[in-house]
Image: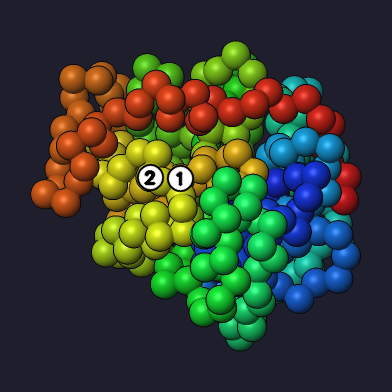
Amino acid sequence: MRITHLRGVELTDPAPEDVAGFYEEIWGLERLDVAGPSVYFRGTGPEHHILSIHPGAQTTVRGYRLGLADRAAVDRAAAELGARSEVRIVSGPGSLGSPGGGCGLRIADPDGREVELSAEVEQATATVPGRITALAVVERAGDASAAGSAATGGRPPIRPTKLSHVVLNSPNAEAYLRLLIEALGFRVADETEHMVFCKCNLDHHSVAIARAPHASLNHVAFEVPTVEDVLVGVEHMAAHGFETLWGPGRHPQGMNAFGYFLAPNGQVVEYTAEVEQIPDDELTPRFWAPEDYEVYDDWADVSSLRPTPATRSLMRGVPETAPHGGS
């Protein structure tokens, strides 16, 4: 099986519209004009949508979406996965009812999320007009002055192009890695004492699994065009009352520039740029020990080598106990 790319991530939240305001008016995504209780966002790249937020009793990662080359690849994937006793097919293969259409199937991951494998999804074309954020969205971040600023209008200076990667905390990390590598064809790019980075195309990693006591989101990374965009993003977020949890800096695994922040719903999000591009025949995964880390750039914060204990706690997330799936 050959996964082409990471399409997007699906979240749940008790108040999707509140979180939607943050992603549109602060984070810089474009909201799609889709009727219904779920909210969909695109970046500036060709993917139809890279983020969806669905109603749910708890803030969770409902799942994520992976690309396949075409309908034939979807059918082959269904046959291959259906022959594996450890893989549960939730739906499909068949036509998808979500915005953008296409065809695909969905499987359950070891922690109860859903992973969509899809092809022939409609590509994004024109830019979607922006909307004004409700004040409540930034008030959830605890900063009323930032809410007033967001309501004045004007588009964010940072415009993510695509979803770069999703990092999941898992109590079933070894089973999860078997799913990614043996069933879905991911390759290990690098490993640390608590995390394994997996790639499906030239990007250093699209999915990473962190060994953890419970299932939750570690963070979601959105790619911006340049390092300068990451640095502008740090300033932009600070101006709206969102402190930088970690960064700016550059990771040794993937050599990507980064800045991490806490979204109003309590999940950790990242601006990233310059993700290392690695052809499979040049892949040389290694284990990174803490002493291997260094500061690579003169603009990097000297404390960016490792996250603080407080940031690690936030990235550990809240145990996700609500059922995944549904609309």
In the displayed structure, 247 sits above or below 35; it is above
Direction left: furthest residue? 298
The quadrant where residue 287 appears: top left
Residue in the foreground of this view, choosing between 162 and 176: 162
Which structural element holds mark 1? strand
The residue carrying mark 2 is 244
Amino acid type for the residue under numbered disc 1: Phe
- At 60% across and 14% down in the image, what residue appears? 213
Say how the picture is coloured. Answer: rainbow
Q: Crowding near pointer 2: few (<14 within 10 Å), some, many (20+)?
A: some
- Which of 88/270 is in front? 270
Residue sitting at 60 percent across and 23 percent down?
170
For residue 166, what is the image quadrant?
A: top right
Residue 80 placement (x, y as % from top left): 72, 38
> Dividing the image into 4 quarters, which one contains the N terminus?
top right
Q: Secondary structure at mark 2?
A: loop
Instruction: Give yes or no for contact between labels 1 and 2 (Cβ–Cβ under 8 Å).
Output: yes
Q: Which callout, 1 or 2, points at the residue further toward the start of the chain? A: 2
Residue 107: image tag: none
What residue is shown at x 78% (from left), y 36% (from top)? 58
- What kind of residue is marked 2? Thr
Image label count: 2
Judge whether residue 98 can be spotted in this image: yes
* Position above or below: 295 against 84: below
**Position above or below: 287 against 90:** above
Residue 39, how many percent across, how many down?
75, 62
In the rendering, at what x and y percent does residue 19 appear? 67, 54
Q: Residues within 10 Å of mark 1 (few under 14, many from 20)?
A: many
Instruction: State left or right for residue 22 relative to residue 91.
Output: left
Answer with left or right where residue 53 lies relative to residue 322.
left
| Residue indicated by mark 1 | 261
Instruction: Work out whether residue 290 or residue 122 is closer to the camera in this orientation and state it.
Output: 290
